[in-house]
Image (spheres, coloured by chain):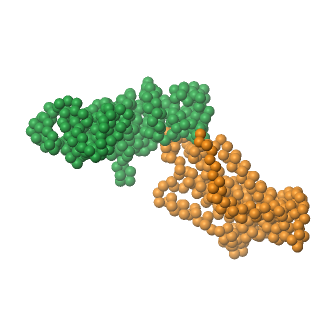
Amino acid sequence: MAAKTENQRAWFFVIPVILLVAFNAIVPLMTVVNYSVQETFGNNQFFWSGVTWFEETLKSERFQAALGRQLLFTAIILAIEIPLGIAIALSMPRSGPWVSVCLVLMSLPLLIPWNVVGSMWNIFALPDIGLLGYTLNAMGFNYDYTQQPLAAWATLIAMDVWHWTSLVVLLSYAGLISIPDAYYQAAKIDGAGKWAVFRHIQLPKMKRVLTIAILLRFMDSFMIYTEPFVLTGGGPGNATTFLSIDLVKKALGEFDLGPAAAMSLIYFLITLLVSWLFYTVMMRNEGEES
Amino acid sequence: MTIELRNVAKNVGGETHIYDTSVRFAETGFNVLLGETRAGKTTLIKLIAGLERPTSGEIWIKGRDVTTLSPQKRNVSLVHQFFVNYPNMNVFENIASPLRVAGVGRKERKRRVEEAAELMRLTPMLKRRPSELSGGQQQRTALARAIVKDSDVVLFDEPLANLDYKLREELRDELPRLLAGRGAIVVYATSEPHEALLLGGHTATMKEGRVTQFGETSKVFRQPNNLDTARVFSDPPMNAASVIKQGNEIVMDTARWRVPDALKNAPDGAYTLGLHPHTVTPVQENTEAVQVQGKVIVTELSGSESIAHFTRGGEDWVSQAHGVHAFKVGETHDFYFDAARGLYFGSDGRLVA
């Protein structure tokens, strides 16, 4: 074995990244941590308050309700977008001129900014003048997302599915086309049916990209803000007040810096924890090359 | 009872992948398909397996017309160049998978899987997933899957191409033994001439979508019917020299020698002389040998053999000789060949003598 060599110069190469991360992540995060353990009555005067805000936030019904709504929303989004995305990817052609047509069509929704999607659907679904809202009402459905919590939820879910299923489709498709033809031939010779091919070849081979798709969709839907904000501002009532909307109300609307900071830290930790859990569970027994 | 291709042809989108081909494969031993990449070996394998349908012609397996049957109904096994196993099943389940689809009972299944695993020396690995195996073990698993089901036909599509040298040697030795006595017809595609020679049996040489010759491997190697076959079946490549027959003499530039007996009655004119690299040597082995001079371009030393590529009269030649010979690149050397061991092809590429 060669003698262990240490070269302090390596630090110079790391410093730019450390500085960048420090200014855009660590310093702001620490400011929030700072707020979360203090009480202020203005005038830039702060008093130590320990974990009071954390306890208060966790115990508050308002937070629990928002968290509950958030979890339900994310669960519905994942339950729809992942299977739907896989199904669309499976039905896309694997070669020929239609491939690029499909890919472009699939990518279009992804290019549209969140607030534009929100405004589009806001107008589209308006019960009196919107194409969707008006049609539904004309067909006899009583639909008004400004009044009915259920209608607001349905609109939000439709909006998110429309906007983001493509991401799952594209990732799954990338996983699918990377499977060598030899696998399908082997399955044909074995006489394996469509379901067996999906279960034993396609799904295991897509595992990695699906993990990434689920993670991305989880984090993104868990942090959803713009769409409900543009659609109803969290209403009707509190029906679509998800965690991020609640947080903004608390921090900017009510200017409760301490509790808002505590809440955002809890929010951050939940997102981190769930993502980590997802990743660990899905990557267990992993080792498969994709 | 064997595999028969009757006037089989395959066109894909205006391009011919296989030209009208009729072959009756041997029932026992290996049937080697030998040819370069894109010669049509894989297409032929797929046609036999039923993964592709011929554009015209018929395929018969064991006295049964299978032309329109699905792969499953043909009772074939296929081992690929890539190590194809189900990624989420362990080795046992992988080997058992064709039996499960075929509806073999649990007890019988276990017995046969264990037997196949024992043969392929996979018994300690039965619980592992393919991703936890080495390349050689993955290919053994694929081989076990192919032999466990007692197929009528076992097809190999360059199964050893992605393995390292040692494993390739090892498996190549084992394969004929594993398949012997199973009653399966074996078709084995490879691009390496020496692999065909080592496996023995019969060989079909292929070039650009045509089977140029089919017969016993050693016979095809020693007595190729045509120049294409001789070229496909020679590694390093066969030397092909333009010669002219003038009465009782063969003329190659300044060199001349007596016409071999078999060529005596052939008309005068241009012929192609084919010489296997091992018949061209840097030392004079007998007094009859024809001497040529060539400028050495590249030399290779492989184990106990010396290979020299040289140019002579505008043609690229290769000499392959036992022992270590010192060649200097760029210098002119003398080489010798025994004209009696040469093959003479007519202008249409057919063997004359």
Quarter of the image with the C terminus of chain B in it:
top left
Measuring 38% from the left and 30% from the top, which residue is drawn there?
B199
Figure quadrant of residue B251: top left
Extreme residue toward the left, this view: B247
Measuring 51% from the left and 55% from the top, which residue is drawn there?
A93
Residue situated in front as seen by the camera: A207 or A117: A207
Residue A234 falls left or right of residue B170: right
Quarter of the image with the N terminus of chain B in it:
top left
| Whole-percent x, y for residue A256 in the image | 86, 67
Does the image show residue B293?
yes
Residue situated in front as seen by the camera: B41 or B56: B41
Measuring 68% from the left and 70% from the top, which residue is drawn there?
A115
Measuring 73% from the left and 59% from the top, which residue is drawn there?
A222
Q: Colour of chain A?
A: orange
Residue situated in front as seen by the camera: B213 or A77: B213
Residue A148 falls left or right of residue B268: right
**In the image, which lettered chain appears green?**
B
